[in-house]
Image: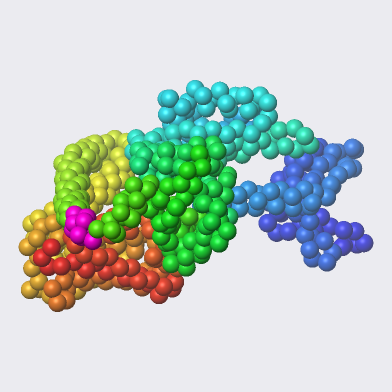
Amino acid sequence: MKDGRVRWDKMTPPEWMAVTHDEMNRFDATGKIGPYEKQYIRKDGTRWWGLFTGKRLAQNFGVEYVLDISDKKAAEEALRASEERFRNLADNVPQVIWTNDAAGTVNYFNKRWYDYTGLSPEESMGPERQQIIHPEDAPASMQQWQRALAEGKIFSAEYRLRRRDGDYRWFIGRNVPLHDDGRIVSWFGSATDIDDFKKASAALAESEERYRLLVDGARDYAIFLLNPSNNIVYWSAGAERVFGWSAEEAIGQSGELVFIPEDRAIEQEEKEIETALQHGRASDRRWHLRKDGSRIWVDGVMHRLDDEKTGALRGFAKVARDATKQRLAEEELKKAHSELEDRVTERTRELVATNTELHNEMRRRQTLEREILEVTERERSRVGQDLHDGLCQELTATAFLLKSKAKAMAGKVPECAKVLHDAAETVNENAGRARDLARGLHPSELGAGGLLVALRELATRTNERTPCRCQFPRSLRISDETIALNLYRVAQEAANNALKYARASEIVITLQKEDHDLVLAVADDGAGMRSPGKKKTMGIHMMKYRADVCGGKLEIESRRGHGTTVTCRVPMES
């Protein structure tokens, strides 16, 4: 306020003075001012945003209009902050996320997209983007998208996307229209990696089919399942043959369907279920009823079925065979003790033969498992060697060529030379990663220096990311190459899991002899797991599998917040 008037220069913050003077000079030169935006200072010292414009009306007279746009600026800042939060969130989720404008043109991809595809932002907005979808999936996917775009409905499809290394993985993609006052203003899309789920589903379907073929092939055995309410939910072809009811007739009926009236009267089935609930199984050897009213002597067993994860009761499985002839024979054999002894002896002989065959089969299976692991290791070695001799050499040569070109262009086009030099450094880094990958697939130290040298090298590589040390006697020697290789793979898997998930400050690898056993342990002081016995990933299955092949066992001890210790114990001579 000066001479009873408000001065614009007193209301203008210092950082806006230069802009204001420019506009005043423009007013003097052209007779016009603005429109432009700036902040003003209120009487109480707070600030507000204004939109300014003005015009000269006479030689020494002009008018300026000021519109308070503080709310507009606050809304713009809130929108900017909201968009920043969205991008931060989108860049930190495992899904691929993108947005399209109302016409369907893509205008944004999150970080996951670029990491997965290897495309640049320019390529992602161009025709190269369409080449990421598998050629077999692209036509149907594009047709569904065009239909969703035309109808304004949600797009949903499964398709394969090419990863930066050339491999394809299955994704489920969804694109949802976003509305404002009833009209579509944009689209929000996401793609979730379901490749592992697809493979697991296919494996489960194959396993279920094998189970169905196995059960339906056992026509001499009645196999059926009961739910916790004692209603039949599955009825095999063997059950139809033994009892006479078809699957359509039996499913949905009570389990007492096959019990004779005398046993129903004394609630024999309820007693059998109670025994199975308490002890996990119940013997079922008694007379049963067939559809035609005849009776057969059944030799069977009922098993309790629990959910592997929760332990909750899922129902019961019943396996039985028609033993009527055997029953009648037993009744006759009671009259002839000597004949009974002969039959018992014969039965014993059969059991011994079966047991011998079982042991032989177990040995054959162990031999096969060992051969499978050996084939797997040979293939890993071949891939690792090819990776080292092929890709690593090519990357090294490429880096050398790029540096050579950079040196040649340094004096002519420094900018290009720097780009070439940076590219060479990137190629060298990728060559190093490829060598690490090749070394993990084909640990040459294991063949050259034995298990101890390979474990030291593993600790050295692990130490590059998390402090890691080895502890084992120098005099320890392992001559069995199969045991050495499997122990190394267990240590490698456990160390990799600690690096990926544990957030540990230290990893310790130990190998020692206890009595007649070799004991390998990989311990970390990281986050630990809630239920290590229940959470069996593929890596844990493979470690246990390798321990079994060596005649040993794998143990995992972990508590939330107290780290994890993986211990593999195998006999020195297996």
Is 220 on the left or on the right of 383, as rendered? right
Q: Quadrant of the N terminus?
A: bottom right
Percent across and percent down for residue 539 are: 32, 55
Q: Nearer the viewer, residue 540 or 386?
A: 540
Q: Nearer the viewer, residue 206 or 490?
A: 206
Percent across and percent down for residue 110 are: 52, 44
- Looking at the image, which residue is at 12% across and 68% down? 572
Percent across and percent down for residue 329 are: 31, 51
Quarter-of-image position of residue 30: top right
Percent across and percent down for residue 554 are: 27, 65
Q: Main secondary structure of the magenta part?
A: helix
- Looking at the image, which residue is at 10% across and 65% down? 573
Q: How many tags in the picture?
A: 0
Q: Quadrant of the C terminus?
A: bottom left
Queried whether the magenta region covers residue 341, the answer comes back as yes
Q: Do we see residue 253 in this rendering?
A: yes
Residue that extends furthest to the right in the rendered view of this protein: 4
Residue 570's place in the image compared with 102, above or below, is below
Residue 554's place in the image compared with 364, above or below, is below
Residue 573's place in the image compared with 396, above or below, is below
- Looking at the image, which residue is at 75% across and 47% down? 37
Queried whether the magenta region covers residue 238, the answer comes back as no
Q: Do we see residue 128 in this rendering?
A: no
- Looking at the image, which residue is at 25% across and 50% down? 437
Quarter-of-image position of residue 251: top right
Is 419 on the left or on the right of 454, as rendered? right
Residue 506's place in the image compared with 391, above or below, is below
- The segment highlighted magenta reads 337-348
